[in-house]
Image: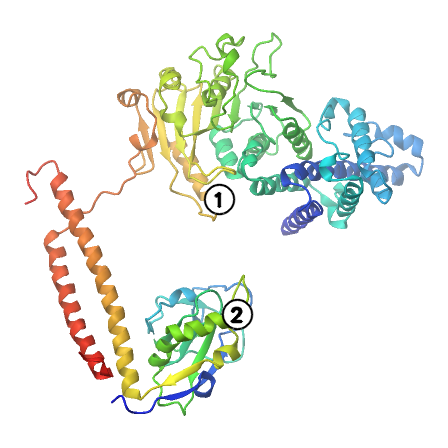
Amino acid sequence: MSNDSVKQEQINKAVWNACDTFRGTVDPSIYKDYVLTMLFVKYLSDVYQDHYDNYVTEYGDTPELIEELMKNERFVLPRDSGFYALYDQRHEPGNGERIDKALHAIEEANIVKLADVFQDISFNSNKLGDEKQKNDILRHLLEDFARPELNLRPSRIGKLDVIGNAYEYLIKNFAATSGKKAGEFYTPPEVSELMAEIVEPKEGDEICDPACGSASLLLKCANQVRKSHDGSKNFALFGQEAIGSTWALAKMNMFLHGIDNHKLEWGDTIRNPKLLDENGGLKHFDIVVANPPFSLEKWGFEGADSDPYSRFRRGVPPKSKGDYAFILHMIETLKPKTGRMAVVVPHGVLFRGSAEGKIRQKLIEEKLLDAVIGLPEKLFYGTGIPAAVLVFRKDKTDNNVLFIDASREFQAGKNQNQLSDENIAKVVDTYKQRENLDKYAYLASLEEIRENDFNLNIPRYVDTFEEEEEIDLMAVQAERKDIEAEIAKLNEQMDGYLKELGYGA
Amino acid sequence: MNHQPKRRCLLQSIAAIQPGYPFRGKLELDSQGDAFVVQYRHLVVGEALYDPQGKTLDRVTLPGRKHPEYLCSGDILFMAKGTRNDAAVVRELPRNTVCTPNFYHIRLTLSACNVLPEFLAWQLNHVNAQRYFAMCSQGSAAPSITKSQLGNLPIVVPPIEQQALMVKLADAATREQQLFNQLIENRQRMVDAAGHQLLRPDTTTGK
């Protein structure tokens, strides 16, 4: 066990160090794609080589036979397209072009799995500098990945998760260093974990994230099923991501976690939902989770009132705030009886009026909203604002809404706060108990929410202020007299000392 | 009284200067430990270290076999690393107390019986000494004072009665500051109490 964690740390460190080659020359938001792609290629190559060597010991050195056998591999690696072929030629000019060709060949050979995954990345790009600099950088990159710590053969590494974790580690670190853009591709792991535990995915569930980023939230949900059902792989992951390079990250992330059976689509979820059923309607899922962009400005207002999937029949969200567009999309993709959903939202979603107020009222009156959970500030990358998680359920029996104010319990950090395991456990337990908890949780009835004009602002329901303690005015005044008397005495003493020191008036 | 001579000397001529206990790496606290340790956060400028039971101190297990140099009453701790270079005198601490290596542990030599430890600590915190430290302090990320720099600090030694008066005056001024802060806080509570009574729905006046 500890051996595994050592290995994990070594690998994490080695891949992070591989980024040094780029530092100072290229921006992290650009080089992250190169490093992550290279990690993926290295992994494919090492697995391939490992299996190849096994066949050699089994059948002897018969390249034709083995090549035929290798066609049934999880990933097929065309000759000369693997990492080691690229590494061997690293001192010759044209590294960028060679890598691009290799990626293309890998994609072609595995077209079902990897179609379009490498289309947004070009190692032969001027982003890496002029021809000479580019060649140099890429040579260094190949050399960094050839180091023994980054030998990713299954026979050395053991569990595949180590590589998936290294990949996530990189994504997390990129998120921490790339400022505002980070929110685009990464949700902090504790928030993902919290959401996954709240929606409790079961064996056989279909799970979807319509704004999946690098897919870490989906993987957390998958992990819930594995953990509670003895490593079961009986679940299906679906996702959609608008940004091409992020979508590619998500695909690679899935493969590196051993989840080949997934469906991740590339496209804008609101304007062009891609996850459809056989009749061309929206596909329905047991679990829908997402951390959609906060208050997206150009979310697709123009076509919304004539949406072919009538997702906005409860009302069209305001032109410049896309929060409810995502919420409504997610609601429409829930399975009628079993659907559970958790979504991260900025606080405005809880109380803004006009169109959003009307949509909110309908969602509450339809008995869909199950819980509102307020999170601490500075949890997310790229923004310090506190966010909330809304939980919706199709299997709700009462019309109450549970409010949890989890905003005051966290591990404080310099730039970033974190939720500890205990913090997460308390939220999840409170959610399951569904009872009032002093200064922390309140179960509000529909009537109470109506009295509040369907405003869900958490302090209206959860009172976290300490009761003012009774102050004895007389005692306070007496104390003041004592203090003043002591000061007068001190004054006299100090005058005396000063006089003795020769400064007397 | 003012006519008695003031002696001038260097700190190293009247005191022994040793680094604190050589803990390696991060300080591992241990609630069952056999020794107490003074850290930066225990030191308040202008106040002596006084905690005979060690209730506010941290406990550690000292790894070394050698008998360490424990702190005694009358020793002075000086913060050598970081942006603060403050000193405090040890009034009373448990017998088995050490300090971290961020401190220098200063002990007056036997021949320096004409110097009050409290006065020396006060002088180390005085603006003249602080100016000297600011000039010596090296390193931008973690400035620090070397042992020889500290040893070369010029010290003024007035007659012992004047030292005692100066210490009393400084202590009284510190106490006065605390009292003024208490007055501010007291007034705030008074305002809170009056406001609370005024806003309470079931009474008509503040009475």
Disc ID at residue A416: 1
Q: Position of residue A361 (x, y in %)?
A: 36, 17
Disc ID at residue B23: 2
The colour scheme used here is rainbow
Q: Crowding at label 2, few (<14), some or many (≥20) Cα neighbours within 10 Å?
A: some
The quadrant in which residue A62 appears is top right
Question: Which quarter shows the C terminus of chain A?
Answer: bottom left
Disc ID at residue A156: none
Horizontal relation, residue B171 to residue B23: left or right: left
The quadrant in which residue A285 appears is top right
Q: Amino acid at mark 1?
A: Gln
Q: Position of residue B148 (x, y in %)?
A: 52, 79
Q: Which of pointers 2 and 1 indicates the residue nearer the eye?
A: 1
Q: Crowding at label 1, few (<14), some or many (≥20) Cα neighbours within 10 Å?
A: some
Q: Amino acid at mark 2?
A: Phe
- On the question of residue A40 being in view, the answer is no
Q: Return the chain for callout 2.
A: B
Q: Position of residue A416 (x, y in %)?
A: 48, 44
Q: Secondary structure at mark 1?
A: loop
Horizontal relation, residue A386 to residue A12: left or right: left
In the depicted structure, whether residue B8 falls above or below residue A368: below
Considering depth in this image, is A181 or A366 the residue closer to the camera?
A181
Q: Position of residue B196 (x, y in %)?
A: 15, 43
- On the question of residue A434 being in view, the answer is yes
